[in-house]
Amino acid sequence: MKKNRKIILLAIVFISLLSLLFISTYLYINDSNSKEKTTKISVIVYGNNSDRWAMLKQGLDQGAVDFGAEVNFVMMTVEDDAEEQKMLLEREIENGAKGIILAATNSKEMAQVVSEVSPIVPIIMVETNVDDVDGLVYISADNYSMGLNIGRSVFLNGDEHRRVAVFMENQQRNSVYDRYEGLMDSLRYSDFTINSWKMGEDDNEPAIFLQKMLKENLVDIIVALEDKSLEAVADAVESSESTVDVYGIGSTNKIVHYLDYGVINSIVFQNEFNMGYLSIQELINDIKMNENVLDTEIQFRTVNRETMYLPNNQRLVFPIVQ
Amino acid sequence: MKSKITDFLRKTGHYYRHKSIQFTLSISFSFVALFGMGFMGATIYSRFVSSTKELTVENKGQLIDQVNMNLNTYLRNMMRISNTMYYSVIKKVDLFQETQTLEREMNLLYEANKDNLVSIVCFRGDGIIVAATPINNLKKDFHVIDQSWFIKANEEIENLHFSTPHVQNLFNDSSFNYHWVISLSRVVELTNNGNISRGILLVDMNFSGIEQIFTKINSDDSGYVYLVDSNGEIIYHPKQNLINSSLFHENNAIAATYEDGTHEENFEDNLRMVTVRTVGYTGWKIINVTPANEFYMSFNQMRFFTGMIIALTILLIFFANQFVSYLIGNPIKRLDDSVKDLEYGKLDLNIFIGGSDEIQHLGRTITSVVLQMHRLMDEIVIEQEQKRKSEFDSLQAQINPHFLYNTLDSIVWMVESEQYQEAISMVTALANLFRISLSKGKNIITIREEIEHAQNYLYIQKIRYKNRFQIKINISPEIYECSTIKLIVQPLLENAIYHGVEFMDGDGEITIKGYLKNNDVFIDVIDNGLGMPEESADLILTDDTRVHKKGSGIGLSNVHQRIQLYFGKEYGLEIESVLDEGTTIHIHLPRMLYNNAIREDENNEKE
């Protein structure tokens, strides 16, 4: 009897020590767990102009800090090469990316690879989606509405019977195509003459092509539907000292500068900071919590030379680079 | 409700009173431990919470002071540049002759503070540039006089005005760089050919200076610091871009109204601690925000830890209680069990002695008490036996005087009437009678002796009663050597003589029969006297008080009791009597050879 009691007592002491050990271990693990591991995410965008993606990148960086992601930002070596982008996508997945944020360089050609990859690795499409792939999350401003808005600005430009040229670059991206449709719809019932300027096979440099077109054609307004072409248009107009009014969608430093100096009349731009931030947020939610994430429409703004310095616009047009 | 509580307390009390000491001890101690530990845990936890809060507040205070100091340096630097420009240059320069000097000095100052400055510009009251550095190519269509810094400076001419951050858009800049700046504007007196006019001095300082101060501070995870102007407009916020995009909201408008110090606020359902410091000169406010859940996380851990420790301690205490109460309670219980045994009349003495000193003492005391009790009981038994014996002896002694007197009287009478021969026989018989009566003090004698004694007695009585009765003695020889207690036949004969045959002249007959029956010895004394009714026959054996005036005085009941005392309840006398026909008294004895009986008797006496 006495012996039994001794054994029980020893067992109690033993269990107590064990539980103490357990508690301290638990606390220790808890502590180390609280420093969350970051999730590797790859962001693949089209083009090779880092300036064009500055705002998106800021949003991505902020999102990475807030949601615990390690972002690998990948650009291409050329403006548009679907093969390269496919390769980059596959490389990033091979390198262990847990999620992909993709701005498709070619909506049609990228569709295949994206539809293959998306069941394996969560993909969030930003800025430009791919065509006809189900279940993809797409974060962007409403491109059609942006087109409508730039069209309205053109329309409000004033005089009747104006000649409008639309610089048709990068139409392989459905974002640009949607904007184009919006633009065309908004001007459908106006009496404006609308020409589409499309670069031929021989034309390599957009600015030179545009200068040529400006010389050859009499136009009052040129509209460009994305950053790269808007920059080219502004460059061409600036260098040819033309008085043509320029409208466009985009907001790189160069575009803002041209807007400030009156080369560009009015721009529509989307809040790419939001785009980057929200894409990280949704991707992390998808990866970590398996939440069903939804398409998110972000805001866009229309500004001209007068309104760009208004405090509310100023902060978006001139991002404080942190 | 009250009655319910009282009822509960009463029941608990009742329950408690009827539980073992071990149970009561362990439950009470455990309850006290639980209560004590709970109280201690709560105290430690609350102390931890308050000290953590204090510490955090203190830390945040220090942090903000540091920011404040850096910000002050930044602002003072700006003011120093402005002051130097104004007092050391503009005031001493006449623009009419020395515009070049002004520009040169301005350039010098700019170069010296290039890292922090974006530009220094001096305007005339109408917005025309007097001098500017590093670029002085003002944008066309740009209306300086509409700018808020220009207006503000003009409104309060004696003050320095700090603007909120804005993009500087004064100059044509061929690079695409746009600087976020903070403008310090003031009214200055310009001297132009001796005439004094009002001008505005603008110092644009790079916003990145402020950014750097805050970025460093905000690099750790615990909360963040932001800066607002006196109207609550955000000057710097670590999540400025998110705020611009409406992805993040800040309570800046309300926070700007807070006094310096630490406040708690509930913003968008988040409890947070806000520490505010006002920056000198500008009325700006540095605001530190620490989300409450940051505390609570560490609180939760602490709570968990405290809880675990308390639980563990309670567990240990509980077991220790069990053990201690066992140590205390078990000896008491065992002692109690021993006493219970005693209570139920278990005689073998085995009182538990053990446990603590007091309990041991108690056990020993009870043992000694019980021992003493036993001893006393034994003594009482012995005393009682002795008393009985002495009583018995005295009863035996009663035989002598009366009978002796009568017999001696008869002898005297014989001698007087000169019947010497009869007298001699009588005296001889008397002597024999006494010899056997005495039997050297023995109680047990043989039946032979007893019968002899009876014969002697009868002889004497026969002479005394002048042969008024006949005697027949018929003893089976096999019982002669059996033992009997002495003086049992003689009282029966006495009884037969006095009650049976005394009054029958010559017809009385007394028969003594001795025989074995069922291996027991029977001696019958039979008379043909008056007899008696059955009731009185039964009464004779039980009633001690009937002592005869005549005779030896030993009643039948005495004989009966003595036989039973010596040989057991199954032995003794049986009386059969029929009125007017006679009485038969059976003496029932065990068959016991004399030698064995003597030994037994001696043994009894020794004990």
Image (tube, rainbow, N blue to C red):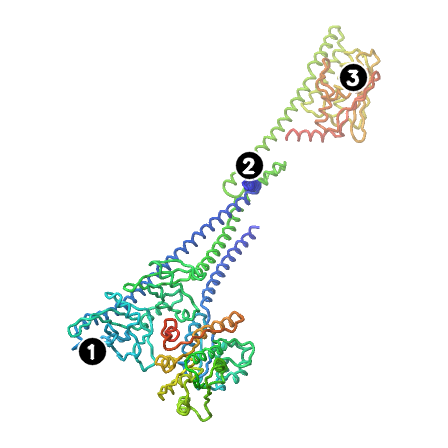
Mark 3 or mark 1, whichever is nearer to me: 1
In depth, the one of A321 and A10 nearer the eye is: A321
Q: CA distance from mark 3 to mark 1?
A: 174 Å
Task: Identify the element where label 1 is drawn.
Answer: helix
* Residue furthest bottom as drawn: A202
What quarter of the picture does the N terminus of chain B occupy? top right
Residue contact at pointers 3 and 1, CB within 8 angstroms: no
* Residue furthest top as drawn: B417
Residue contact at pointers 1 and 2, CB within 8 angstroms: no
Q: Is residue A1 above or below residue A99?
A: above
Residue B120 x/y as whole percent: 25, 74
Task: Identify the element where label 3 is drawn.
Answer: helix
Q: Is residue B3 left or right of residue A29?
A: right
Q: Which mark is residue A197?
A: none
Q: Which mark is residue B366?
A: 2
Residue A317 x/y as whole percent: 38, 75
Mark 2 or mark 3, whichever is nearer to me: 2
* Residue furthest left as drawn: B194
State the image quarter where residue B342 is shown.
Answer: top right
- The number of callouts visible is 3
Q: Earlier in the sequence, mark 2 or mark 3?
A: 2
Q: Is residue A132 left or right of residue B188?
A: right
Q: Amino acid at mark 1?
A: Arg
Mark 1 — residue? B104
Mark 3 — residue? B496
Q: CA distance from mark 2 to mark 3?
A: 58 Å
Output the chain of dot 1.
B
Output the chain of dot 2.
B
Q: CA distance from mark 1 to mark 2?
A: 118 Å
Mark 2 is surrounded, within 10 Å at the Cα level, by few (under 14), some (14 to 19) or many (20 or more) other residues, namely: some
Residue contact at pointers 2 and 3, CB within 8 angstroms: no
